[in-house]
Structure formats: structure tokens, C-alpha cells
Image (tube, grey):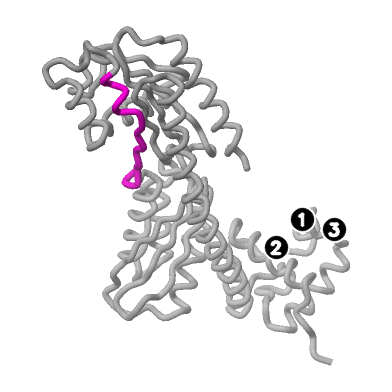
């Protein structure tokens, strides 16, 4: 009767491979029995390991030693891992698109609410990635001269990067590179991906060091990226309510800044940087304190919000220096708390 690869054998094989990847040492039944999720005796595990050896998934390099994965075992593990990741990426893409649409509409409504409640101009940005860690990488073949790297970081942010290759890579090579990269890099922040680790990965990659370099560059870009910054504004016409801002075309300059949004990027960067350095809460920029040239006669009050760990955005109120600071601060604080509680850790 032919042996079959059931769920228990699959879990034991995966435990053997994970342990071997971590230690580089042959794995015995006692080691595997310590995996709490298996909840099996050493005797049962020995029997299953014997079956796995007979099926060709593991081998015993020495008579008295534990087992190590065979090429067939690695193939089974990688195929399952990549199938799971492909499913996760597919589901995540659908979810991200849906959530992005919902979030965009929500942020537009928040900007309108801020302007309506205060009678000043308002803006809010989409959340940006800060201090994120890598969740996983998926490489896949596009054609003979390129591969696609799908990089997922905390907050389920996906970045796609097309990577040119000097010679065609077969599916086996791509799967081995996937296993190598995910084994060493998953769960690390950009600061933790140091030169020593990169050198180790390149050594293990052999002739494919150029691909590894390109993927690691793409990972760094994905973790740092903020090119998708969106700024939503509302209430620009409220500026005309305040005579001190309507002289000498000041109002049109302010409105132009809100509509063009280019100048606002520096304000966003400054506010989020202050947040990272520990200046939490409400920030107030009066007159020349703001970096936006056209708003030197205004006061700008800002607050950050957090949707997921490491994903922060900024909202702000722009008005005359004689603005009702207490009301503005309270409005920002209330919406900040509502956004935090609505999305965080969902």
C-alpha cells in the first residue's frame, strides 16, 4: 500500500525544514516533538519520519544522526509556501484596492468635516509608511528577460517591482531565490538588513547576486516609499471670510497652494518627522514658523493619525492668526481619536 502525504506528515516535514533552515543541523524526533502545535509523542514522530524518509522527502546523512530535507522535500515545502503566498497576495490585492477606495472617500469626508466645523481651510493626507518591516517577498517570472518582485510590508502595503535579468531564470531557480530571501529577510526592518546579512544572502545565491541586489534595493524602496502621498483639501473659500488674508492677493496664493498641493509636501514631512522624534499631539505653526511660503500670514495647526502600526497621516487646519485655537485643537483631537480607533488593529 502506497504511503500518502497527509496533514500530519506535512506538518512534521515543515517542522523539520524550518528547524534545519534555522540551525543547519540534522533534526531528530525529540526536537520536532517540542513544537507545541504538533502535540505528538516522539514515538509517533519517529514513525512518521520513517515514512517521510521512505517517501523520499527527508534523508538521514549519518546512521546516528537526525534527518535533513531532500530536494523532493524542499520542492514540496516551497510549492506549498508559494501557493499560500500567491493566494495571500491575490486576496490582499483585492482587499487593498477595496480599502484604498474606502479610505480615499473617508479622508475626503474628514477634510470636509474639519472645514465645516471650524470655518477654516482644511487638509488631510493619506497614510505613509514609517519604520515598517518586511512581511514577505514573492518573485515570479514575467518573461525571459525580467521577473516581478511583489513586496509586502507591515500594514499590508504591496509594492511591485519589475527586475531585469541578464539570462532567463527557470522556475526552480526562482523558487530557491524565494526561499532564500524569505528565510533571511521576513520580519526585518530596513535598519536590520545590514551589509553582513546581504553578503551572506549573496554568497548563498551563487551566480544570481545581481538579482538579489535588485530585490533588496526594491525592498528598501518599498519600506521607505512615500510616492503615493495623496493630499485632500476642503474649505479653501473660507479664507475669504477673514479680511486680513484677502489683501494683496494673499487669499489667491493660499488657495493656489491648497489646490496645487506641491508646497504642502514639506509641511507634511516636517509634521511626520516631529511625530517620529516624539513631538506627539497637536502642532501649531504661527506665521513664519510654517514652511509654506504663501501661508506666512496664517496659522497652521496639525495633528497626526495612525491607521496601522507604522502607517501615519497628517491633518491640518489653515486659518488666520486670530483663529479659535481651542476649538481647532479639540476638533483635530476628536477626529484623530476617531480615525485611530476606526482602523487600528483591525
Q: What is the magenta range?
A: 226-240
Find residue 39 and name its label: 3
Residue 209 locus on image (x, y percent): 34, 64
Count of marks placed on residues: 3
Whether residue 280 is situated above or below residue 41 in the rendered picture: above
Find residue 262 and name its label: none
Question: Visible in this render: residue 333?
Answer: yes
Residue 261 locus on image (x, y percent): 26, 36
Residue 66 locus on image (x, y percent): 72, 67
Residues at marks 1 and 2 touching, judged by CB atoms closer than 8 Å: yes
CA gap, disc 1 to disc 2?
Answer: 8 Å
Q: Is residue 187 magenta?
A: no
Q: Nearer the viewer, residue 189 or 251?
A: 251
Find residue 35 and name its label: 1
- Classed neighbour count for the residue bearing mark 2: other residues with Cα under 10 Å, few (<14), some (14–19), many (≥20): some
- Classed neighbour count for the residue bearing mark 1: other residues with Cα under 10 Å, few (<14), some (14–19), many (≥20): few
- What quarter of the picture does the C terminus occupy? top right
Q: Is residue 227 magenta?
A: yes
Mark 2 lies on residue: 15
- What quarter of the picture does the N terminus occupy? bottom right
Secondary structure category for the residue under label 2: helix
Secondary structure category for the residue under label 1: loop
Q: Residue at x 47, y 22 (%)?
A: 332
CA gap, disc 3 to disc 1?
Answer: 7 Å
Secondary structure category for the residue under label 3: loop
Residue 67 locus on image (x, y percent): 69, 70
Amino acid at each position: 500500500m502506497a504511503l500518502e502525504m497527509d496533514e500530519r506528515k506535512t506538518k512534521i516535514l515543515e517542522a523539520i525544514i524550518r528547524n534545519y533552515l534555522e540551525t543547519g543541523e540534522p533534526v531528530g524526533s525529540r526536537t520536532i516533538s517540542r513544537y507545541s502545535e504538533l502535540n505528538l509523542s516522539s514515538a509517533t514522530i519517529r514513525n512518521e519520519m520513517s515514512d517521510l524518509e521512505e517517501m523520499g522527502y527527508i534523508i538521514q546523512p549519518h546512521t546516528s544522526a537526525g534527518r535533513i530535507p531532500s530536494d523532493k522535500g524542499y520542492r514540496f515545502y516551497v510549492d506549498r509556501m508559494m501557493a499560500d503566498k500567491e493566494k495571500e497576495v491575490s486576496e490582499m490585492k483585492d482587499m487593498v484596492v477595496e480599502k484604498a477606495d474606502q479610505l480615499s472617500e473617508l479622508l475626503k469626508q474628514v477634510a470636509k468635516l474639519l472645514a465645516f466645523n471650524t470655518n477654516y481651510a482644511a487638509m488631510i493626507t493619506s497614510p505613509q509608511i514609517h519604520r515598517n518591516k518586511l512581511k514577505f517577498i514573492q518573485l515570479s517570472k514575467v518573461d525571459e528577460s525580467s521577473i516581478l518582485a511583489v513586496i509586502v510590508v507591515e500594514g499590508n502595503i504591496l509594492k511591485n517591482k519589475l527586475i531585469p535579468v541578464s539570462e532567463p531564470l527557470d522556475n526552480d531557480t526562482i523558487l530557491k531565490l524565494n526561499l532564500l530571501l524569505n528565510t533571511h529577510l521576513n520580519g526585518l526592518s530596513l535598519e536590520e538588513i545590514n551589509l553582513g546579512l546581504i553578503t551572506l544572502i549573496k554568497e548563498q545565491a551563487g551566480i544570481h547576486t545581481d538579482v538579489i541586489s535588485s530585490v533588496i534595493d526594491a525592498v528598501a524602496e518599498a519600506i521607505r516609499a512615500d510616492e503615493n502621498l495623496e493630499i485632500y483639501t476642503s474649505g479653501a473659500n473660507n479664507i475669504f471670510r477673514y479680511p486680513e488674508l484677502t489683501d494683496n492677493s494673499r487669499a489667491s496664493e493660499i488657495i493656489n497652494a491648497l489646490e496645487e498641493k506641491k508646497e504642502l509636501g514639506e509641511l507634511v514631512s516636517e509634521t511626520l518627522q516631529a511625530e517620529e522624534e516624539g513631538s506627539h499631539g497637536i502642532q501649531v505653526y504661527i506665521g513664519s514658523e510654517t514652511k509654506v511660503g504663501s501661508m506666512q500670514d496664517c496659522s497652521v495647526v496639525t495633528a497626526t493619525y495612525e491607521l496601522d502600526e507604522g502607517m501615519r497621516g497628517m491633518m491640518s487646519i489653515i486659518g488666520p492668526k486670530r483663529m479659535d485655537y481651542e476649538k481647532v485643537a479639540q476638533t483635530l483631537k476628536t477626529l484623530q481619536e476617531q480615525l485611530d480607533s476606526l482602523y487600528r488593529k483591525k
